[in-house]
Image (tube, rainbow, N blue to C red):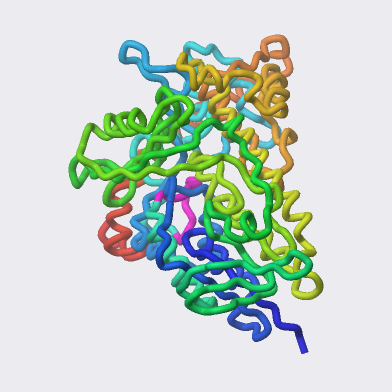
Amino acid sequence: MQRRRSILIVGGGTAGWLTAAYLAKALRVAEQAHLEITLLESPEIGIIGVGEATFPTIRNTLRFLGIDEAAFIRQTSATFKQGIRFVDWARAPDDGRRHSFFHPFEAPFSTEGTSLAPYWLLQDEAGRAPFAEAVTIQARVADAQRAPKRPHESDFAGPLNYAYHFDAAKLAGVLAERARELGVKHLRGNLSEAVLDETGAIAHVVSPEHGDLSADLYVDCTGFRAELIGKALGSPFKSARGVLFADRAVACRAPYERPDAPIQSYTVATAHEAGWTWDIALAHGRGVGCVYSSDHIDDDRAEAILRDYVGGAEIETRKITFDAGYREKQWIKNCVAVGLSAGFLEPLESTGVVLIEAAVAMIAELFPHSGPVSAPARRFNELMTARYDNIIVFLKLHYALSRRPERFWRENTDPASIPERLVDLLEQWRHRPPARFDFILDLETFAFFNYQYILYGMGFRTDLTDGAGEFPDVAEAARLFAKIRGFADRATQDLPSHRDLIAQINQFGFDTALEGA
């Protein structure tokens, strides 16, 4: 007879319910009498939901879970996200002039053996198009406030790569419903204590409402409190504060100026004197937040920056404090941490959700159906540590290239605050663009072209003049640049407006929407 295996997830929210639903689907819990997944959710703890945005991997996750895309969009007030527009990062506004660049989700257009990056770099700087606009159609599609797909296209598919903006609390509700459908047992109650056995593993946890709860594997989704991995098992927290200075955010919801106002299909990240402000367009309003370093401005100044950004409207704000970093060991004995309990870097590039996705996929793939439940711990810790470290490098890139004069930005360009790996890569990239062999895919969240978008959006110079003769396909590259411009012209005409598509999905769904389109 097969030995029973049980998993207890402590904590709800996006991390807890995504973990529960994913593991239930991957392990086919509803069909396996020997497997059991239980989630203990406190009714007293709210959802932080910083950022309220995702990376394109979320589409594969939702598809895997069997969630209908139109229903997901309706139930979470979701909109499409095609990338991020960075405003004022490279330099501060000067006499009304502002710098911005777009980081699309689409990979740069290429043909076999022909990368356009060197040919863009060899063009005259004064006359060439911005990098993202030159090598993809997505920059122009997003700026034209068009959607990345059409009403008749199937779930999670479309001509352009995309993710979502959404209401985090509503997302947790959708995931919870799906997890219960997949066989997850839901307990409402609090955690009062985690009791260890003689080996230092968790023997059981105590809930005032449910008594002693035991399992083979405990998943810590208790957020910043890290009740199991941190408090009970003592995994040290490795701070990244010396690299990523931001440690606070003040957030609000802002209404649209009018009901038919365009909905941006990208996150807007606008730099300020000591950090940056996110602006996320949902179906019925905007989520706006000021991210900042408390070493450089105080809370009152951050609140003033936020209120000035939203036009001084009467808004209700909430403050969030965090310490950038991660647990040195995220899987100890019979406990693994997922989400904020494992680590948090900052609400940029939707890193929180994508790290949850990476963790749960690994847990499902490595899950020991027999033998010690701690068997995957070392490999899991190696992979997740590498992911956190590599994301830190990518996030630091945004700050390290800035030419803003304020103290926050000057200190971000101090070599002492830049990871050694990034210093080495930047030196190499002065003579060649980022390439796929710079990165090991399974350890990365961002590809080489994501680095290209940031580098060349921020004005970084890669000097290829001495080797220009090694790139002889100038005529072919010019033809491809023109082809991309033509595709972009057509796409901005053929794709529906973002607001119109969201309205159609909310009213009709995808298939029926075509009848009235």
Give residue 214's position: percent from left, percent from top.
Answer: 64, 76
Give residue 383's position: percent from left, percent from top.
Answer: 72, 49
Task: Name the quadrant containing residue 213.
Answer: bottom right
Tally of numbered tags: 0
Residue 82 vertical placement versus 405 (above, below): below
Left or right for 458, reference 237: left
Residue 163 within the magenta-colored segment of the rendering: yes
Quadrant into which the N terminus falls = bottom right
Residue farthest to the bottom? 1
Left or right for 262, reference 139: left
Give residue 92's position: percent from left, percent from top.
Answer: 41, 17
Left or right for 454, reference 95: right
Residue 162 vertical placement versus 471 (above, below): below
Residue 166 vertical placement versus 468 (above, below): below
Query: Residues in magenta?
Result: 154-165
Is residue 128 visible from the viewing direction of this image? yes
Residue appearing at x 52%, y 55% in the figure: 223
Task: Name the quadrant containing residue 515.
Answer: bottom left
Is residue 490 visible from the viewing direction of this image? no
Task: Name the quadrant containing residue 378.
Answer: bottom right
Is 92 in front, or is 11? 11
Is 15 in front, or is 324? 324
Residue appearing at x 40%, y 25% in the figure: 272
Residue 471 vertical placement versus 387 (above, below): above
